[in-house]
């Protein structure tokens, strides 16, 4: 958006905006513009723009700051039409810059309803009648048949008919002529106050003060009635289903064989308007409860119900379910079995006791359970007893239990490899089982955590650290292992699919091609709620992925992503490892520490496919501005700070977004994190290009390129430079003529003047000599002067050997000081730091500014040990320095090295001290570190 700015003041051609102090309390209406922003008409908080997280208030010009807003609609040109309570109707243009008021409305009229018809006529329902506004006009015209009537609600039918709910009945407006319109001739509506109306095909749901009526226009004599108090708004939900908002709460109204039936969805809230956004999410505008989305229904508990086994006060260890001839559910130290339509609890007879159960399988006539205390079998259909195998193990902790395609039983163990029991053992007594232990090359702390069979009947085994093995009758073979980029973190589970293998890891979801040669990594940018994946399963059509921040599903080709929205009572932070598993009828089971739920595709919400990324707001020298859809911003010459906030409009808080930016057409993108706020300062004159990118739900969205224009000072422009040179020549010429005249007039005093100038020249030379040897900011020696002094010192040491110690001193976090507090504060820190060192050092010590925030000190006749003690005192003194502009402690790191008598001893000592300084920085800063050769000397 292009602003008109001068060098002295910011003149913005646009609406004034500000952040509201609090969340809106009374919201009467909502609309969505073409950029996907939501606009709210609030009674006390004004006209608000909502991006899903933050509100921005748009203030009209003049003394109308505290208007009470009641209605808002948006036309095809993306203009806002805003109704107020006693101040008429206003239009805010598509750039959100100019306000204009509709004329010819009574001053006392209060706007009750706005409707923009399909013919782009704006119908204005007021407390004193119905008005219409033709396209392109700003003058309202009264609809005479409804003069003086209070208009409560307006709804348009598919055929263009507009139904008007009034204080005196239901009015049918069939065209723009009064002769073709009229009151609905039904005795139930005659002279009655109609509060709301919803149209669906030929069905009208009409709300009165105390009743709801369903009228079929094809059979007007048949009227279905429901007692219902004070409806404020009605919204069609689906065929024979409506949502109704009243002063008593939010209801669902359904037409059944028994008539109209209601279901309370939300109580104790005064709902004023229901609004459906482009994604199908329904929002509630309310009185006293603000603006909020219609919460999704709670998830269904697992069926049959097992709540009697769960304590609401105690979190449980609920593992994945297992399906054999029965259905099993792990619960703390026991197992639940679904038998005869009911759950029963079976215990384990073992010492030490079982802490958790991983799997249950049927192996011939045996029902076997894998636990952290080994293998168990079901005894007498009553409880589980241990199974003793012919193998000695340090720790019999079973992570996975599986039956291979050949009928063999496989046990994946923690740190103990794999055990295989042949299929024929299923027909034998357990005492005769011959278990074979297979030892893959697993490092310490690794173990087999998942075993799965693919569609080709191949057996796959996955280790904790991501090694993938293929199991055969007498061996296991390593087939794939993660590269260095994937080694950090653990693997949790896997899912063989038709043409790929999915692996769950701490770094995301990994997809391996069927031949294990191609690897694709899914992270948060690809749609995962969290990059740590702890569960995966497959239903007939979908793959489901579990994280502790959400559940994602998608088609096997990676398309059609859906996310589980936050639900009441569902806390995924306590979800169990592999706590997601498949149920019947394309449903899945979700196990957390507080309960088990059933999920289906109906519980998921689709990830938007056409999201928009906008520059949502801008702070210029701490002043807030709104920016439209233009992509050029002219900045003032005196720019202290510019803050740009971008927003990907998803209106789905459960969809995690990552932002990136690119400056001046760079090749690489820089991460901004989850909040796209970019702060810029000290921009050079000229044009700067900025691009922002957002990744969410497997999609990449780019903002429009943004040009930031910093005015070039006049004297830097060609005409300004030419004028400056010309003026300089004139001034020099004038000065020259004045000088000549002055010399002519003072010829007799020439000798005195020459002597005086000679003395001044000598003084200037001395000053230049001093300046050439000192640092202009700190007054210390510069590097050239120090080298000269060091050379003289070394020559003296060659004649008279003496100790010499070199110290490199570096101010810690100096870049952060410059970035956070500015370069002026950084200069103050350097001068204060240098002054303190000069005060504390001896007269014979040589101190120089080595470069940037780095200082070099030469200490003649001083060994390393005394020098270290003095540096320790300096280190403590530096931390006590008080700098008014700096609210963080100042610290420094010291590197100390002895200087030998070698011909290039100074360079060698500098390198040694620099290495010591580097070690001090790496060890945490604010330290004194001796060079390696100095350590040997001190020993």
Image (cartoon, rainbow, N blue to C red):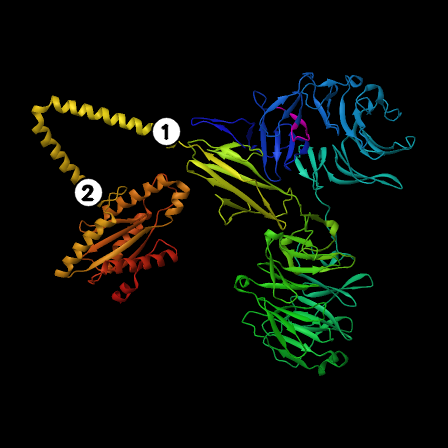
Q: Residue 202 in the image: x percent, y percent?
A: 85, 34
Q: Nearer the viewer, residue 754 or 268?
A: 754
Q: Residue at x 55, y 62 (%)?
A: 486
Instruction: Check if residue 69 falls in the magenta segment.
Output: yes
Q: How many marks?
A: 2
What residue sits 56% from the left and 74% below the top?
A: 441
- In this rendering, the answer to whether 840 lies above or below 142 is below
Residue receiving disc 2: 770
* SS at circle 1: helix
Q: Where does label 1 land, which residue?
A: 720
Q: Secondary structure at mark 2?
A: helix
Q: Is residue 185 visible?
A: yes
Whole-percent x, y for residue 276 in the image: 72, 38
Decide: is 693 above or below 168.
below
Q: Residue 675: x and y, percent?
A: 54, 44
Where are the magenta residues, as a range? 67-80
């Amino acid at each position: 958006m292009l602003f008109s700015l001068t060098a002295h003041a910011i003149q913005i051609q646009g609406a004034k905006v500000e952040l509201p102090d609090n969340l809106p309390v009374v919201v009467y209406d909502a609309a969505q513009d073409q950029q996907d922003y939501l606009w709210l008409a609030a009674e006390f908080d004004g006209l608000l723009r909502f991006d899903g997280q933050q509100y921005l208030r748009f203030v009209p010009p003049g003394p109308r700051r505290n208007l009470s807003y009641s209605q808002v609609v948006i036309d095809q040109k993306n203009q806002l039409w805003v109704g107020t309570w006693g101040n008429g109707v206003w239009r805010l243009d598509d750039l959100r810059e100019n306000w204009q008021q509709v004329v010819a409305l009574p001053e006392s009229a209060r706007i009750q309803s706005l409707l923009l018809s399909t013919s782009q006529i704006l119908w204005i329902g007021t407390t004193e009648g119905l008005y219409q506004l033709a396209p392109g006009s700003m003058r309202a015209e009264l609809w005479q048949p409804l003069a003086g009537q209070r208009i409560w609600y307006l709804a348009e039918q598919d055929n263009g008919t507009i139904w008007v709910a009034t204080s005196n009945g239901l009015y049918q407006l069939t065209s723009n002529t009064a002769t073709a319109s009229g009151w609905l001739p039904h005795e139930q509506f005659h002279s009655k106050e109609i509060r709301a109306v919803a149209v669906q095909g030929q069905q009208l749901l009409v709300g009165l003060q105390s009743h709801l009526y369903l009228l079929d226009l094809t059979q007007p004599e048949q009227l279905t009635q429901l007692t219902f108090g004070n409806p404020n708004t009605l919204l069609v939900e689906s065929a024979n289903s409506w949502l109704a908002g009243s002063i008593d709460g939010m209801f669902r109204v359904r037409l059944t064989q028994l008539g109209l039936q209601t279901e309370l969805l939300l109580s104790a809230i005064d709902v004023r308007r229901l609004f459906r956004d482009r994604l199908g999410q329904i929002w509630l505008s309310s009185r006293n409860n603000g603006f909020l989305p219609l919460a999704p229904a709670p998830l269904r508990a697992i069926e049959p119900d097992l709540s009697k086994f769960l304590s609401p006060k105690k979190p449980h260890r609920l593992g994945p379910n297992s399906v054999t001839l029965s259905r099993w559910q792990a619960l703390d130290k026991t197992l639940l079995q679904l038998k005869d339509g009911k759950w029963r609890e079976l215990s384990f007879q073992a010492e030490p006791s079982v802490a958790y159960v991983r799997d249950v399988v049927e192996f011939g006539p045996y029902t076997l359970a894998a636990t952290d205390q080994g293998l168990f079998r079901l005894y007498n259909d009553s409880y589980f007893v241990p199974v003793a195998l012919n193998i000695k193990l340090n720790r019999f902790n079973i992570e996975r239990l599986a039956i291979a395609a050949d009928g063999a039983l496989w046990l994946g163990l923690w740190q103990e490899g794999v055990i295989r029991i042949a299929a024929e053992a299923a027909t034998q007594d357990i005492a005769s089982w011959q278990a074979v232990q297979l030892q893959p090359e697993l490092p310490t702390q690794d173990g087999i955590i998942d075993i799965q069979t693919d569609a080709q009947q191949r057996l796959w085994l996955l280790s904790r650290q991501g090694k993938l093995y293929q199991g055969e009758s007498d061996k296991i073979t390593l087939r794939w292992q993660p590269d260095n980029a994937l080694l950090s973190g653990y693997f949790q589970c896997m899912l063989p699919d038709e043409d790929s293998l999915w692996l769950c890891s701490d770094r995301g979801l990994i997809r391996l091609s069927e031949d294990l040669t191609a690897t694709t990594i899914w992270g948060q940018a690809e749609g995962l709620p969290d990059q740590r994946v702890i569960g995966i399963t497959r239903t007939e059509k979908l793959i489901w992925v579990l994280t502790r921040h959400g559940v994602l599903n998608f088609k096997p080709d990676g398309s059609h992503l859906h996310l589980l929205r936050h639900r009441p009572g569902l806390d995924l932070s306590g979800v169990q490892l592999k706590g997601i598993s498949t149920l019947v009828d394309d449903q899945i089971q979700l196990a957390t520490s507080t309960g088990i739920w059933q999920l289906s595709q109906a519980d998921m919400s689709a990830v938007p496919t056409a999201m928009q990324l906008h520059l949502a707001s801008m702070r210029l020298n701490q002043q807030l501005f709104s920016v439209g859809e233009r992509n050029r911003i002219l900045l003032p010459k005196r720019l202290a700070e510019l803050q740009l906030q971008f927003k990907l409009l998803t209106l789905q808080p459960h969809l995690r977004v990552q932002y990136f930016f690119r400056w001046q057409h760079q090749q690489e993108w820089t991460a901004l994190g989850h909040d796209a706020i970019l702060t810029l300062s000290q921009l050079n004159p000229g044009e700067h290009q900025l691009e922002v990118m957002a990744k969410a739900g497997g999609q990449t969205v780019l903002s429009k390129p943004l040009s930031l224009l910093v005015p070039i000072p006049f004297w830097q422009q060609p005409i300004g430079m030419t004028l400056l040179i010309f003026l300089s020549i004139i001034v020099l010429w004038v000065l020259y003529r004045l000088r000549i005249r002055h010399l002519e007039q003072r010829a007799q005093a020439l000798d005195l003047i020459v002597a005086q100038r000679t003395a001044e020249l000598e003084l200037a030379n001395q000053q230049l000599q001093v300046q050439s040897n000192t640092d202009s900011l700190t007054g210390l020696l510069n590097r050239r002067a120090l080298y000269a002094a060091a050379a003289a010192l070394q020559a003296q040491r060659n004649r008279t050997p003496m100790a010499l110690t070199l110290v490199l001193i570096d101010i810690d976090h100096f870049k952060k000081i410059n970035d956070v507090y500015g370069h002026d504060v950084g200069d103050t820190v350097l001068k204060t730091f240098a002054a303190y060192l000069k005060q504390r050092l001896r007269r014979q010590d040589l101190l120089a500014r080595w470069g940037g925030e780095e200082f070099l000190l030469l200490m003649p006749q001083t060994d390393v040990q005394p020098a270290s003690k003095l540096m320790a005192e300096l280190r403590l003194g530096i931390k006590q320095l008080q700098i008014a502009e700096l609210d963080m402690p100042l610290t420094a790191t010291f590197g100390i090295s002895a200087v030998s008598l070698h011909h290039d001893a100074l360079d060698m000592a500098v390198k040694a001290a620099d290495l010591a300084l580097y070690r001090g920085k790496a060890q945490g800063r604010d330290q004194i570190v001796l060079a390696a050769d100095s350590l040997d000397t001190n020993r």
